[in-house]
Image (tube, helix red, strand yellow):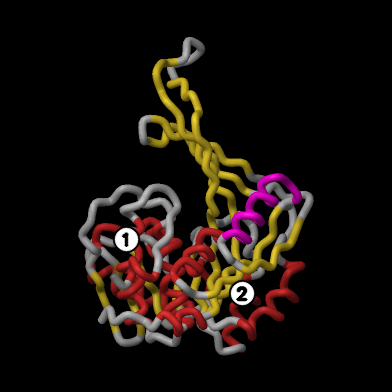
Amino acid sequence: MNQPIPKERLAQARVLVVGDAMLDRYWFGAVDRISPEAPVPVVRVNREEERLGGAANVALNAKTLGAQATLLTVVGDDEPARKLKSLLERDGVATLLGSDPQLYTIVKLRVIGRSQQLIRVDFENTPDHEVLAQMLADYERALPEHDAVLFSDYGKGGLTHIPRMIELARAAGKPVLVDPKGSDYSRYAGATVITPNRAELAQVIGAWSSEAVLHERAHALRRQLGLEALLLTRSEEGMSLFDAAGEFHVPAQAREVFDVTGAGDTVIATLAAMLACGLPLREAVAHANRAGGIVVGKFGTATVSYEELFA
Protein backbone atom coordinates (compact mmCIF):
# COMPACT_ATOMS: atom_id res chain seq x y z
CA MET A 1 0.00 0.00 0.00
CA ASN A 2 2.82 2.41 0.89
CA GLN A 3 4.80 2.16 -2.36
CA PRO A 4 7.08 5.20 -2.66
CA ILE A 5 6.05 7.78 -5.24
CA PRO A 6 9.00 8.55 -7.55
CA LYS A 7 10.60 11.78 -6.31
CA GLU A 8 10.54 13.25 -9.84
CA ARG A 9 6.80 12.65 -10.08
CA LEU A 10 6.21 14.43 -6.79
CA ALA A 11 8.41 17.36 -7.90
CA GLN A 12 6.00 17.89 -10.83
CA ALA A 13 2.92 17.97 -8.57
CA ARG A 14 1.58 21.49 -7.95
CA VAL A 15 -0.64 22.30 -4.97
CA LEU A 16 -2.48 25.61 -4.56
CA VAL A 17 -3.14 26.38 -0.88
CA VAL A 18 -5.80 29.00 -0.08
CA GLY A 19 -6.65 30.16 3.42
CA ASP A 20 -5.70 31.92 6.63
CA ALA A 21 -1.93 32.28 7.01
CA MET A 22 -0.31 33.06 10.34
CA LEU A 23 3.06 33.45 12.00
CA ASP A 24 3.96 31.15 14.89
CA ARG A 25 6.35 32.78 17.35
CA TYR A 26 8.04 30.87 20.15
CA TRP A 27 9.78 32.46 23.14
CA PHE A 28 11.87 29.92 25.07
CA GLY A 29 13.21 30.70 28.51
CA ALA A 30 14.22 29.63 31.96
CA VAL A 31 11.69 29.53 34.79
CA ASP A 32 13.40 29.99 38.16
CA ARG A 33 10.84 31.82 40.25
CA ILE A 34 7.23 32.84 40.75
CA SER A 35 6.35 36.49 40.19
CA PRO A 36 5.85 38.65 43.33
CA GLU A 37 3.04 40.46 41.45
CA ALA A 38 0.79 37.46 40.77
CA PRO A 39 0.96 33.65 41.15
CA VAL A 40 2.55 33.14 37.73
CA PRO A 41 5.99 31.88 36.65
CA VAL A 42 8.57 34.43 35.53
CA VAL A 43 10.12 33.37 32.21
CA ARG A 44 13.55 34.77 31.38
CA VAL A 45 13.50 34.55 27.57
CA ASN A 46 16.80 33.38 26.08
CA ARG A 47 15.75 32.24 22.61
CA GLU A 48 13.16 33.24 20.03
CA GLU A 49 11.96 31.25 17.06
CA GLU A 50 9.55 31.99 14.23
CA ARG A 51 7.75 29.46 12.05
CA LEU A 52 5.07 29.49 9.37
CA GLY A 53 1.61 28.76 10.76
CA GLY A 54 -1.92 28.14 9.52
CA ALA A 55 -2.27 27.91 5.73
CA ALA A 56 1.40 28.93 5.39
CA ASN A 57 2.40 25.82 7.35
CA VAL A 58 0.16 23.69 5.11
CA ALA A 59 1.93 25.06 2.01
CA LEU A 60 5.31 24.48 3.66
CA ASN A 61 4.34 20.86 4.39
CA ALA A 62 3.53 20.23 0.71
CA LYS A 63 6.83 21.86 -0.28
CA THR A 64 8.94 19.95 2.29
CA LEU A 65 7.47 16.71 1.03
CA GLY A 66 8.81 17.55 -2.43
CA ALA A 67 5.79 18.99 -4.27
CA GLN A 68 5.49 22.55 -5.58
CA ALA A 69 3.30 24.78 -3.42
CA THR A 70 1.69 28.17 -3.96
CA LEU A 71 0.04 30.04 -1.09
CA LEU A 72 -2.82 32.43 -1.87
CA THR A 73 -3.75 34.54 1.15
CA VAL A 74 -4.21 38.08 2.44
CA VAL A 75 -1.95 39.57 5.11
CA GLY A 76 -1.73 42.93 6.85
CA ASP A 77 0.72 45.69 6.08
CA ASP A 78 2.84 45.08 9.17
CA GLU A 79 6.02 43.54 10.58
CA PRO A 80 4.60 39.97 10.93
CA ALA A 81 3.57 40.10 7.24
CA ARG A 82 7.13 41.00 6.23
CA LYS A 83 8.47 38.17 8.39
CA LEU A 84 5.95 35.74 6.89
CA LYS A 85 7.03 36.75 3.36
CA SER A 86 10.70 36.25 4.12
CA LEU A 87 10.08 32.79 5.65
CA LEU A 88 7.98 31.71 2.66
CA GLU A 89 10.68 32.96 0.30
CA ARG A 90 13.40 31.17 2.27
CA ASP A 91 11.47 27.89 2.15
CA GLY A 92 10.67 28.11 -1.56
CA VAL A 93 6.89 28.46 -1.27
CA ALA A 94 5.48 30.52 -4.16
CA THR A 95 3.04 33.23 -3.03
CA LEU A 96 0.07 35.22 -4.23
CA LEU A 97 -0.21 37.63 -1.31
CA GLY A 98 -2.86 40.29 -1.04
CA SER A 99 -2.18 43.11 1.39
CA ASP A 100 -4.88 44.75 3.49
CA PRO A 101 -3.82 47.64 5.76
CA GLN A 102 -6.93 47.12 7.96
CA LEU A 103 -5.85 43.57 8.73
CA TYR A 104 -3.51 42.41 11.48
CA THR A 105 -1.42 39.52 10.21
CA ILE A 106 -2.29 36.70 12.63
CA VAL A 107 0.44 35.92 15.15
CA LYS A 108 0.33 33.12 17.72
CA LEU A 109 2.96 33.70 20.37
CA ARG A 110 3.79 30.70 22.54
CA VAL A 111 5.89 31.14 25.69
CA ILE A 112 7.78 27.94 26.53
CA GLY A 113 9.46 27.28 29.88
CA ARG A 114 10.80 23.97 31.19
CA SER A 115 9.93 22.37 27.84
CA GLN A 116 6.24 23.10 28.16
CA GLN A 117 3.92 25.75 26.82
CA LEU A 118 3.01 28.18 29.62
CA ILE A 119 0.77 30.53 27.67
CA ARG A 120 -0.30 31.34 24.12
CA VAL A 121 -1.02 34.92 23.12
CA ASP A 122 -2.95 35.55 19.87
CA PHE A 123 -2.73 38.77 17.86
CA GLU A 124 -5.50 39.12 15.29
CA ASN A 125 -8.56 41.11 14.31
CA THR A 126 -11.68 40.12 12.43
CA PRO A 127 -11.80 41.85 9.06
CA ASP A 128 -15.01 43.83 8.54
CA HIS A 129 -15.04 42.78 4.89
CA GLU A 130 -14.24 39.71 2.79
CA VAL A 131 -10.46 39.80 2.59
CA LEU A 132 -10.00 37.26 -0.20
CA ALA A 133 -12.73 38.60 -2.50
CA GLN A 134 -10.29 40.93 -4.24
CA MET A 135 -8.07 37.93 -4.99
CA LEU A 136 -10.65 35.89 -6.94
CA ALA A 137 -9.04 37.00 -10.21
CA ASP A 138 -5.60 35.84 -8.99
CA TYR A 139 -7.17 32.56 -7.94
CA GLU A 140 -8.74 32.02 -11.37
CA ARG A 141 -5.41 32.76 -13.07
CA ALA A 142 -3.54 30.34 -10.81
CA LEU A 143 -6.00 27.43 -11.16
CA PRO A 144 -4.82 26.05 -14.55
CA GLU A 145 -1.23 25.97 -13.29
CA HIS A 146 -1.99 23.67 -10.36
CA ASP A 147 -3.00 20.01 -9.99
CA ALA A 148 -4.90 20.21 -6.69
CA VAL A 149 -6.49 22.95 -4.58
CA LEU A 150 -6.39 22.88 -0.79
CA PHE A 151 -8.49 25.17 1.38
CA SER A 152 -7.11 25.63 4.88
CA ASP A 153 -9.93 27.20 6.88
CA TYR A 154 -9.06 28.52 10.33
CA GLY A 155 -12.30 30.47 10.68
CA LYS A 156 -10.47 33.81 10.52
CA GLY A 157 -12.68 35.34 7.83
CA GLY A 158 -10.44 34.60 4.88
CA LEU A 159 -12.67 32.05 3.18
CA THR A 160 -16.14 33.55 2.94
CA HIS A 161 -15.99 33.12 -0.85
CA ILE A 162 -15.09 29.45 -0.69
CA PRO A 163 -18.26 28.13 -2.47
CA ARG A 164 -17.38 30.09 -5.62
CA MET A 165 -13.74 29.00 -5.41
CA ILE A 166 -14.72 25.32 -5.06
CA GLU A 167 -17.08 25.66 -8.02
CA LEU A 168 -14.31 27.13 -10.20
CA ALA A 169 -11.80 24.44 -9.19
CA ARG A 170 -14.25 21.59 -9.84
CA ALA A 171 -15.20 23.12 -13.22
CA ALA A 172 -11.47 23.08 -14.02
CA GLY A 173 -11.34 19.39 -13.07
CA LYS A 174 -9.07 19.87 -10.04
CA PRO A 175 -9.36 17.81 -6.85
CA VAL A 176 -10.44 20.05 -3.96
CA LEU A 177 -9.43 19.34 -0.35
CA VAL A 178 -10.80 21.23 2.65
CA ASP A 179 -9.62 21.36 6.24
CA PRO A 180 -12.95 22.57 7.70
CA LYS A 181 -13.91 24.85 10.59
CA GLY A 182 -17.14 25.74 12.35
CA SER A 183 -20.53 24.05 12.22
CA ASP A 184 -21.71 25.09 8.74
CA TYR A 185 -20.23 22.66 6.23
CA SER A 186 -22.67 23.64 3.47
CA ARG A 187 -20.04 26.08 2.18
CA TYR A 188 -17.77 23.13 1.37
CA ALA A 189 -20.38 21.46 -0.87
CA GLY A 190 -18.91 19.89 -3.98
CA ALA A 191 -15.39 19.46 -2.58
CA THR A 192 -13.53 16.22 -3.31
CA VAL A 193 -12.68 15.50 0.32
CA ILE A 194 -12.94 17.27 3.69
CA THR A 195 -10.71 16.28 6.63
CA PRO A 196 -12.34 17.09 10.00
CA ASN A 197 -10.99 15.74 13.29
CA ARG A 198 -13.30 14.09 15.83
CA ALA A 199 -14.25 17.29 17.68
CA GLU A 200 -14.88 19.19 14.43
CA LEU A 201 -17.09 16.46 12.96
CA ALA A 202 -19.05 16.05 16.21
CA GLN A 203 -19.95 19.78 15.98
CA VAL A 204 -21.70 19.04 12.70
CA ILE A 205 -23.20 15.55 13.02
CA GLY A 206 -23.43 15.36 16.82
CA ALA A 207 -21.56 12.99 19.12
CA TRP A 208 -21.80 9.36 18.02
CA SER A 209 -22.40 6.49 20.43
CA SER A 210 -21.07 3.75 18.15
CA GLU A 211 -19.18 3.11 14.92
CA ALA A 212 -22.46 2.22 13.22
CA VAL A 213 -23.95 5.64 14.09
CA LEU A 214 -20.76 7.37 12.92
CA HIS A 215 -20.80 5.51 9.58
CA GLU A 216 -24.45 6.29 8.97
CA ARG A 217 -24.09 10.02 9.75
CA ALA A 218 -20.76 10.46 7.95
CA HIS A 219 -22.18 8.95 4.76
CA ALA A 220 -25.34 11.05 5.09
CA LEU A 221 -23.22 14.22 5.38
CA ARG A 222 -21.05 13.15 2.44
CA ARG A 223 -24.09 12.62 0.22
CA GLN A 224 -25.78 15.81 1.41
CA LEU A 225 -22.71 17.92 0.52
CA GLY A 226 -21.95 16.07 -2.72
CA LEU A 227 -18.45 15.12 -1.55
CA GLU A 228 -16.47 12.25 -3.03
CA ALA A 229 -15.22 11.44 0.44
CA LEU A 230 -14.97 12.47 4.08
CA LEU A 231 -11.73 11.70 5.91
CA LEU A 232 -12.06 11.64 9.70
CA THR A 233 -8.74 12.04 11.53
CA ARG A 234 -8.97 10.25 14.87
CA SER A 235 -5.61 10.79 16.65
CA GLU A 236 -4.65 7.53 18.35
CA GLU A 237 -7.44 5.70 16.49
CA GLY A 238 -5.92 6.45 13.08
CA MET A 239 -8.15 7.64 10.23
CA SER A 240 -11.42 6.63 8.63
CA LEU A 241 -12.30 7.44 5.03
CA PHE A 242 -15.97 7.39 4.06
CA ASP A 243 -16.47 7.23 0.29
CA ALA A 244 -18.90 5.80 -2.28
CA ALA A 245 -17.29 2.37 -1.87
CA GLY A 246 -17.94 2.34 1.88
CA GLU A 247 -15.39 2.76 4.67
CA PHE A 248 -11.62 2.46 4.68
CA HIS A 249 -9.83 2.58 8.03
CA VAL A 250 -6.10 2.98 8.63
CA PRO A 251 -4.77 2.44 12.17
CA ALA A 252 -2.50 5.05 13.77
CA GLN A 253 1.24 4.53 13.42
CA ALA A 254 2.36 3.56 16.92
CA ARG A 255 4.93 6.07 18.17
CA GLU A 256 5.50 8.44 21.03
CA VAL A 257 3.31 11.52 20.67
CA PHE A 258 5.31 14.62 21.50
CA ASP A 259 3.18 17.41 20.06
CA VAL A 260 -0.01 17.33 17.96
CA THR A 261 0.30 21.00 16.87
CA GLY A 262 -0.14 21.22 13.11
CA ALA A 263 -0.54 17.45 12.59
CA GLY A 264 -3.75 18.10 10.62
CA ASP A 265 -1.78 20.46 8.36
CA THR A 266 0.71 17.69 7.56
CA VAL A 267 -2.06 15.16 6.88
CA ILE A 268 -4.00 17.33 4.41
CA ALA A 269 -0.84 18.66 2.71
CA THR A 270 0.36 15.08 2.13
CA LEU A 271 -3.08 14.07 0.88
CA ALA A 272 -3.12 17.02 -1.56
CA ALA A 273 0.39 16.27 -2.86
CA MET A 274 -0.56 12.63 -3.48
CA LEU A 275 -3.81 13.55 -5.27
CA ALA A 276 -1.83 16.10 -7.32
CA CYS A 277 0.36 13.15 -8.39
CA GLY A 278 -2.76 11.38 -9.61
CA LEU A 279 -2.97 8.80 -6.82
CA PRO A 280 -6.36 7.32 -5.91
CA LEU A 281 -7.78 8.69 -2.66
CA ARG A 282 -7.47 5.49 -0.61
CA GLU A 283 -3.80 5.14 -1.53
CA ALA A 284 -3.21 8.82 -0.73
CA VAL A 285 -4.84 8.35 2.71
CA ALA A 286 -2.34 5.63 3.66
CA HIS A 287 0.58 8.01 2.91
CA ALA A 288 -1.11 10.90 4.75
CA ASN A 289 -1.67 8.72 7.81
CA ARG A 290 2.01 7.80 7.89
CA ALA A 291 3.03 11.46 7.59
CA GLY A 292 0.73 12.40 10.48
CA GLY A 293 2.27 9.68 12.61
CA ILE A 294 5.78 11.04 11.97
CA VAL A 295 4.97 14.70 12.62
CA VAL A 296 3.41 14.19 16.09
CA GLY A 297 6.86 13.01 17.22
CA LYS A 298 8.25 16.51 16.59
CA PHE A 299 7.93 19.75 18.57
CA GLY A 300 5.69 22.61 17.42
CA THR A 301 4.36 23.12 13.90
CA ALA A 302 6.60 20.75 11.97
CA THR A 303 6.92 19.08 8.57
CA VAL A 304 7.84 15.69 7.08
CA SER A 305 10.38 15.19 4.28
CA TYR A 306 10.19 12.78 1.34
CA GLU A 307 12.99 10.72 2.89
CA GLU A 308 11.18 10.44 6.24
CA LEU A 309 7.88 9.48 4.64
CA PHE A 310 9.30 6.75 2.43
CA ALA A 311 12.12 5.58 4.71
Residue ranking furthest to the right: 101
Q: Is residue 146 above or below residue 100?
A: below
Segment colored magenta:
77-90
Q: Quadrant of the C terminus?
A: bottom left
Q: Quadrant of residue 41?
A: top left
From the image, tell me which residue sits under label 1: 294
Residue 265: percent from the left, percent from the top? 45, 61
Label 2 element class: helix
Is residue 239 inside the magenta stretch? no
Q: Is residue 190 visible?
A: no
Earlier-in-chain disc, 1 versus 2: 2
Can you say which quadrant of the picture contains the N terminus? Answer: bottom left
- In the picture of the structure, the residue carrying the numbered disc 2 is 163
Tell me if mark 2 has few (under 14), some (14-19) or many (20+) residues whose alpha carbon lies within 10 angstroms of its own.
some
Question: Looking at this view, is 193 or 12 the one in front?
Answer: 12
The image shows residue 92 at horizontal and vertical percentages of 58, 65
In the image, what residue type sits under mark 1?
Ile
Badge 2 amino acid = Pro
